[in-house]
Image (cartoon, grey):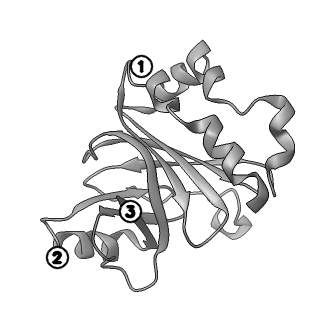
Amino acid sequence: MYMYITAGTYSYLKKLKEQHPAEKMMLMQNMRTAELWHETNKASLFQSPRKYETMDAFGHFASEGFVACHCVSVRDENRPLFEYNFENKLTFIKQEEGIIAARILRPLSSETYIIMTLWQSESFYVRWEKSPTFTKFQIPQHLGNMFSSPPHTYTYIVSEDEIEELEEDPFNPESS
């Protein structure tokens, strides 16, 4: 199974998703961007997507929820070790309250792996972050040198409606 990811405006990506109702797609957004994820065994419908192979998966995309994408850039020589450490990791999370779906994605056109979790709401994700199960999801400290840059997390909302713009943008002094 492959995952193809493209970014753009919410309205454009929503139209693209609506043009392909038979395809398995999830539209997610945050205050900065929107992404459309297309999961398929076929070729991508997107012109120039980021390409991933699904290493592990459970659950199905939903039309509502909270998404956390843990992005981990791994040096080429450390990819086998990273993948070994993430084999069967999703078994630790399947029973967590509020989890809907998860994917571990191997990059085909970059060095950044994505561990995506989809939750009923942000509160379930926050609760999981404080649980012992979350600790089992972490890379052991002694393997920290396998990364080419520090891991980071992006969060999104999956909703049928576009999120409204912030009245005050903390990154733009002209918005206040």
Asked if disc 1 and disc 2 are in contact, CB closer than 8 Å, the reply is no
Whether residue 131 is visible to the viewer of this picture, yes or no, is no
The residue located at (33%, 76%) in the rendering is 44
Mark 3 secondary-structure assignment? strand
Instruction: Check disc 2: other Cα within 10 Å, few if <14, some if 14-19, many if 20+.
Output: few
Give the numbered dot on residue 96. Answer: 1
Q: What residue type is labelled 3?
A: Tyr
- Corner quadrant of residue 173: bottom right
Give the numbered dot on residue 5. Answer: none
Q: Which amino acid does label 1 sit on?
A: Glu
Given residues 145 and 161, the one toward you in this image is 145
Q: What residue type is labelled 2?
A: Gln
Q: The C terminus lies in which quarter of the figure?
A: bottom right
Give the numbered dot on residue 2. Answer: 3
Asked if disc 1 and disc 3 are in contact, CB closer than 8 Å, the reply is no
Mark 2 secondary-structure assignment? loop
Q: Mark 2 = which residue? A: 19
Mark pair 1, 2: CA separation: 34 Å
The residue located at (76%, 52%) in the rendering is 78
Mark pair 2, 3: CA separation: 20 Å
